[in-house]
Image (tube, grey):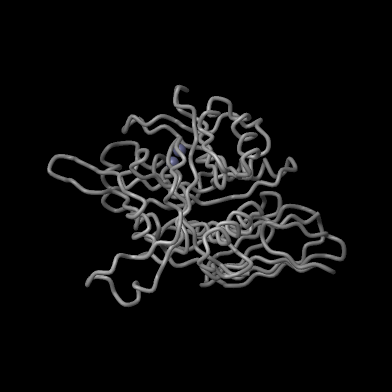
Amino acid sequence: MHEIIVNLHMHTRYSDGTGTHKDIANAAIKTGLDAVIVTDHNVLVQGVEGYYRLALSSAVTQRLRTKRVLLLVGQEVHDQDRVPQKNHLLIFNANRDLSALADDPQALINGVAAAEGICFIAHPRDPEAPAFDEDDISWEDWDVQGYTGIELWNGLSELKTLVPTKLHGLFYALFPQFVGHHPIPETLHRWDSLMENGKRVVALGGSDAHALHLNMGSLHRVIFPYEFHFKTVNTHIFVPEPLSGDVPTDKKMIYDALAKGHCFVGYDLPASTSGFRFKAKGLEHSTIMGDEIPVKGGVTLQIHTPLKANIHLLKDGKIIARRLNGQDLTYIATEPGIYRVEVFRNYLGKKRGWIYSNPIYIR
Ligand SMILES: [Zn+2]
Ligand SMILES: [Zn+2]
């Protein structure tokens, strides 16, 4: 398996972002991403998918000249007539624009399957931010069936929990490195309870990058530029082969891996999360996060982090083992359950979430 770093969920001028697909590709190359998935609101932009390189100029260093990034295009669909505009769905790999189905979440999810796509509930909990006239745009219709997973950590929803006043907003606009703490706790609980009810639910991390312009008095700047977002919450995906450079082949590998949950959410700003591993070894099978393994004969769970950190192993939403300030944790599981990992590190004076794995389902 090969680990690649993907940033997903972002907006261009085709909806409410301020940059172009080319701007996004340039920022992604500079931050060292392997792929990005652009998801404009209620539009499936055609003709821009592919590998991008930086335009050659004297400012481009030798190292960056050889770099490329795969840009893929999905969409974020919601009902624009709904007040407030809740129920946002991230759709990848569908063979057509599905925004016409936006007014009925279940019909939309069914439409994604019919269009051979996969879909994820965007920012499941997204509270209001009255100081900025922002509504609560959480997901409401939790009785829907057939979606692939949820966006566990969304950079913008978390910001909305931190800005009771305009002054707080200004602080985080100027010092965005202080925003990221962890996924919204209600979203984590929601994820665990969906899985306890027997669903397989894949977790992703999304940036929701817009590269917004801020104008306050004499201050004009782009806040949360794409390049900043690409260094923060990423989805690290395990693909069976290294990316080949052939767009259809690589696109299929990435979406197959996302559909299976062969990925983890990494907050890469405190330190790169590349190299994190969570594996299971049973009597006859071995597996990685996202997969199922039989409990018969016991299952050895192995966790490795790229740097020393506080590692928590959870079963059915509850911590069952911890490693403080270490890089490895091994645990022998003898009971069926949903096992997942959370890793924390100190950064800018606070303990912050660093890694959230997809689960290994022991049956
Ligand atoms: Zn949204
Ligand atoms: Zn969005």
Residue 175, x across and y down, in percent: 29, 53
Q: Residue furthest left?
A: 218
In the image, residue 106 sits, relative to residue 298, either above or below, namely above
In the image, residue 131 sits, relative to residue 206, either above or below, namely above
Q: Residue furthest right?
A: 296
Quadrant assignment for the N terminus? bottom right
To which quarter of the image does residue 361 belong?
A: bottom right
Quadrant assignment for the C terminus? bottom right
| Residue situated in front as seen by the camera: 144 or 73 | 73
Residue 10, x across and y down, in percent: 42, 47
Seen in the image, is 289 located left or right of residue 274?
right
In which quadrant of this rendering is ligand 1 seen?
Answer: top left
Q: Is residue 157 at all visible to an observer of this figure?
A: no
Seen in the image, is 161 located left or right of residue 101?
left
In the image, residue 25 sits, relative to residue 78, either above or below, namely below
Q: Is residue 43 at all visible to an observer of this figure?
A: yes
| Residue situated in front as seen by the camera: 331 or 363 | 363
To which quarter of the image does residue 191 belong?
A: top right
Q: Residue at x 32, y 50 (%)?
A: 224
Residue 337, x across and y down, in percent: 76, 52
| Residue situated in front as seen by the camera: 224 or 92 | 92
| Residue situated in front as seen by the camera: 141 or 300 | 141
Q: Residue at x 30, y 65 (%)?
A: 55
In the image, residue 289 sits, relative to residue 325, either above or below, namely above
Q: Residue furthest front?
A: 47
Total residue callouts:
0
Residue 200, x across and y down, in percent: 70, 47
